[in-house]
Image: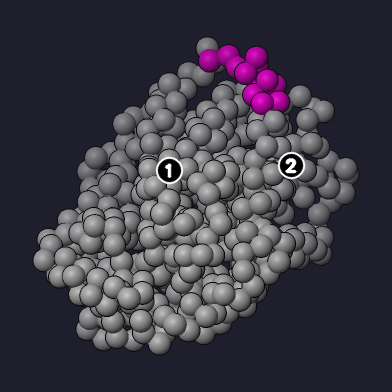
Amino acid sequence: MTTGATEGRAAAGEGGYEAFKVEQRGIELVPDDERPMRPSGLFWLWAGAIWNVEFLVYGALIVSFGLSFTQAVIAILVGNVFYVVLGLASLQGPETGTTALMVSRAPFGRNGNRAPALFNWITQVGFEIEGLALIVLVLVAMFGRGGIHSGTGLKIVFIAFAVAIQFVMPFLGHATITRVLRWLSLLFIVVFAVMAALVIPEVDLAHLHQHATWAVWTTALVLLISAGGLGWTENGNDYSRYLPASTPKARTFWAATLGGAIPSILLELLGAAAFVVSPHVTSVTGVPSSFASWFFWPFLVLAIFQLLAINTIDMYSSGVTLQALGVPVKRVGAVLIDTVVAGAVTAAVIFSNDFYTYLSGFLDYIVVWLAPWFGILMVDWLLRRGRYDRAGLASPAGGVYWRNGGVNWRAVVALVLGMAAALMWIDAQYYQPSYLSPISRATGGSDLSWLVGTLVGAAVYWVASLRSVPAELVAGEAVTSGF
């Protein structure tokens, strides 16, 4: 075992794994005897995050693109099949005992991995900003309902309040997040049932006279995929790493897949139905317009807790990603940095008055890096038959994954080519920054960036690494035989 791995193992022992106490462990390897999580805990963690008003809005948003209700239902069902990729991206955590962007060092190398780590940190902070901005908008709506105008000063107070509350659970860490999200899941399920009972009797599909082209349908699909299964792949191992290494892979896979897919499908279907009742449902503050008037206050109060819950997942992951990027800071310090950055940018977004345009563009563009990265990670996992040199992942230098100065150029080139392919088939003409790719232009505005990005990244890496990765596996097993 390398010195770096030894130090990581020692540091990981600090604080143990206990809810409502500050978790000291960041990206350090989790020892086998300190993994008390069970697959049911992973299921309820994801369910607690996804039972969220954001996903109801996504369902309404795709209908606003011009889709018929039937087209929306098909897009929702197809889009949420992609939670299987979250399940696949959760299998490495129990094997390695570390986070997603630490596992990413296997294909990219320690230094080569800084690029996807940076992309992921920006992505996670972007989702944090989305959640914080939505909380502020909810508070503005609540005060407005009470007759109080939210000027600049009051909005600043709202932002400070949201940032302060948001900080708590990511600061406490994994065990607290797992416990609290399980509790919240049960509450959210009850409220979903109430919302469904209020909306469904009011739906009259005869009033929805629209039908989108195939190209528009693919644009709706990419939003659901990026906000759903594919958009969570870079978080998967951050939460599954506390499962014992002996956990059956099938149980890990289904816990993550179903924990995300079930609430996502139900909420998006309800959102699509709610849009038929009221087109204002495309914003969080407009959602109550499809319910009875008495539900306004209970819904928006609950929405704040839901948004805090989903943001917790992103903020915890952004902290450990900052460490994987190489920033010399402990996990709790990384959470503090992310909190300050997210709060500052949230203020800029709130005062720009163009939040939903930025949100849609953000969801579209993150696929550009995420799709090829996921393809590369999965090909690497398959080529090494799911086995990793844990010491090599934690080592500050040298080891099986060091390669050329800490960079595996095969993976870097595959990522660049995959990103280029994704940019050749993306339709972001109505977002910021506005861009319509050549293939999208030629196909009426279709968007298959997620598909071509994944396939090109995966194919290039597979061709380039078909022999080298199995050779690394042999070398790594020789090193880890005594780990």
Decide: few, some or many residues near mark 2? Use Cα within 10 Å; few <14, some 14-19, many ≥20: some
Q: Position of residue 109 (x, y in %)?
A: 30, 76
Disc assigned to residue 149: none
Return the residue nearer the eye: 115 or 313. Answer: 313
Q: Nearer the viewer, residue 36 or 342?
A: 36
Relative to 248, does residue 12 appear above or below in the rendering?
below
Q: Residue at x 42, y 37 (%)?
A: 80
Which residues lie in the magenta part? 193-205
Mark linked to residue 251:
1
Q: To which residue does mark 2 refer? A: 302
Q: Is residue 357 left or right of residue 343?
A: left
Residue nearer the viewer, 312 or 32: 32
Location of the C terminus by quadrant is bottom left
Identity of the amino acid at label 2? Leu
* Residue 375 sits inside the magenta stretch: no
Q: Is residue 249 above or below residue 261?
A: below
Residue 4 at x, y = what percent? 42, 84
Query: Which structural element holds mark 2?
Result: helix
Q: Quadrant of residue 464?
A: bottom left
Residue 103 is drawn in which quadrant? bottom left
Kindly state the secondary structure of the residue where label 1 is placed: helix
Earlier in the chain: of badge 2 and badge 1, it is 1
